[in-house]
């Protein structure tokens, strides 16, 4: 018998950053992200009962068989006891497509592992605590993937005094003021080449980092503040936390034992222009960075016309490409 499941799961951009892990993909601090809408992975899983035939596992990305990523996915699946029996009994083919180009600072592993975990959870018959289980299983593939299950904002990581938070899985942020329900994200591509240092190496460098303890404390504090900021609709605090987080993440990279620099001169040009524009116009716009040189510009839809003019007139010369996204609802089954 043939079973087939099709899913679409988005990427996300962290506002409070996960940077440093321990054990089996557990975070050293809590994080909180905005779920994207247009940047997603669409994935179809086809599983045919084996009837004694040899097992095959094929992973196609954008129509082309991708053995390197396929092997990473197979190893991940084999390591999850929940999927062991299903893997053993089926011949599997995955067709996966990303709605966004490669190396754009959009976390493709987040959308991919959220989609993979969701498709396998559904097809292999997991029903109990379904969304929570998908989030937990996605986390085991790529930490930040666990937040891509929910929208428009999700948090991951245990926070003292905040019910429902866990290191094992993410949860949706419950109380969002109308100010933050319609957020835009203009992704300014400064460099479209692959990252010089992978995130897993970056996480590892937090192990003996001289500022690790202070950083983990700062991130947890930012998360707690972000919950109340999103609830109250406070743009000023939102901007302060988001930009401080982006710069703290990169400060960690610049001050680790094996230090490195991912921001480029044009990243700085753009950040300065955004701060200046905000000062002059008093508009609620801010930047964040992923582990790379590209900039995510966040602003509410209500000021979109002014921001688009600002981008066209002042930022475009510093960019290679611009992708326009916004906050989304999380993953769906198609
Ligand atoms: O999920 P990973 O292991 O690729 O790490 C993601 C780290 C950041 O994107 C820099 C921050 C985050 O919280 O998403």
Image: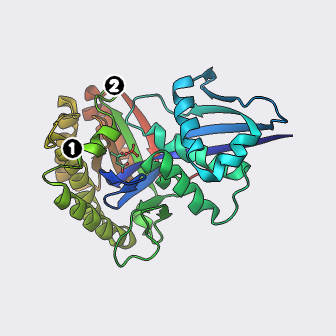
Percent position (x, y) of residue 63? Answer: 64, 23
Can residue 235 be seen here? The reply is yes
Residue 152 or residue 180, whichever sits in front: 152
Residue 315 or residue 125, whichever sits in front: 125
Residue 243 or residue 182, whichever sits in front: 243
**Residue 216 drawn above or below residue 174:** above
Residue 117 or residue 304, whichever sits in front: 117
* Residue bearing the label numbered 2: 320
Percent position (x, y) of residue 302? Answer: 40, 55
The circle drawn on residue 250 is 1
**Residue 299 drawn above or below residue 102:** below
Quadrant for the N terminus in the image: top right
Q: Residue at x 22, y 59 (%)?
A: 240
Q: CA distance from mark 1 to mark 2?
A: 21 Å
User: Is the distance from the Cβ of mark 2 to the nearest ligand 1 atom less than 8 Å?
Assistant: no
The circle drawn on residue 327 is none
Can residue 38 be seen here? The reply is no
Total numbered labels placed on residues in the image: 2
**Residue 286 drawn above or below residue 230:** above
Q: Badge 1: few (under 14), some or many (20 or more) residues near its Cα, within 10 Å?
A: some
Q: Badge 2: few (under 14), some or many (20 or more) residues near its Cα, within 10 Å?
A: few
Q: Residue at x 70, y 62 (%)?
A: 127
Instruction: Locate residue 23 relative to residue 277 in the image: left or right.
Output: right
Instruction: Locate residue 135 relative to residue 304 in the image: left or right.
Output: right
Residue furthest out toward the top: 64
Q: Residue at x 60, y 25 (%)?
A: 62
Mark 2: secondary structure: loop
Percent position (x, y) of residue 77? Answer: 59, 43
**Residue 126 drawn above or below residue 36:** below
Instruction: Locate residue 263 relative to residue 30 in the image: left or right.
Output: left
């Amino acid at each position: 018998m043939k079973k087939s499941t099709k899913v679409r799961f988005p990427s996300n951009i962290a506002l409070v950053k996960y940077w440093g892990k321990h054990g089996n993909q557990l975070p050293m601090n809590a994080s909180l992200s905005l779920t994207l809408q247009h940047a997603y992975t669409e994935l179809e899983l086809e599983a045919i009962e084996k009837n004694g035939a040899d097992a095959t596992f094929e992973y196609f990305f954008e129509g082309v068989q991708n053995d390197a990523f396929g092997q990473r996915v197979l190893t991940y699946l084999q390591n999850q006891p929940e999927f062991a029996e299903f893997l053993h009994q089926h011949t599997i083919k995955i067709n996966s497509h990303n709605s966004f180009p490669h190396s754009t600072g959009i976390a493709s592993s987040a959308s991919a592992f959220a989609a993979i975990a969701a498709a396998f959870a559904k097809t292999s018959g997991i029903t109990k605590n379904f969304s929570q289980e998908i989030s937990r299983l996605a986390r085991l593939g790529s930490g930040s993937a666990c937040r891509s299950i929910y929208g428009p904002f999700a948090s991951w990581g245990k926070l003292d005094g905040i019910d429902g938070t866990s290191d094992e899985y993410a949860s949706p942020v419950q109380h969002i003021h109308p100010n933050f329900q319609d957020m835009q994200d203009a992704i300014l591509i400064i460099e479209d080449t692959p990252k010089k240092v992978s995130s897993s190496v970056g996480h590892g460098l937090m192990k003996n980092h001289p500022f690790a303890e202070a950083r983990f404390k700062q991130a947890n504090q930012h998360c707690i503040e972000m919950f109340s900021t999103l609830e109250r609709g406070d743009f000023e605090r939102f901007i302060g936390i988001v930009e401080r987080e982006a710069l703290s993440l990169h400060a960690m990279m610049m001050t680790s034992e094996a230090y490195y620099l991912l921001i480029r001169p044009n990243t700085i040009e753009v950040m300065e222009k955004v701060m200046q524009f905000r000062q002059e116009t008093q508009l609620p716009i801010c930047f964040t960075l992923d582990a790379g040189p590209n900039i995510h510009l966040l602003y509410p839809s209500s000021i979109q016309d002014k921001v688009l003019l600002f981008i066209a007139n002042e930022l475009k010369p510093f960019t290679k490409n611009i992708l326009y996204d916004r906050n989304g609802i999380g993953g769906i089954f198609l």
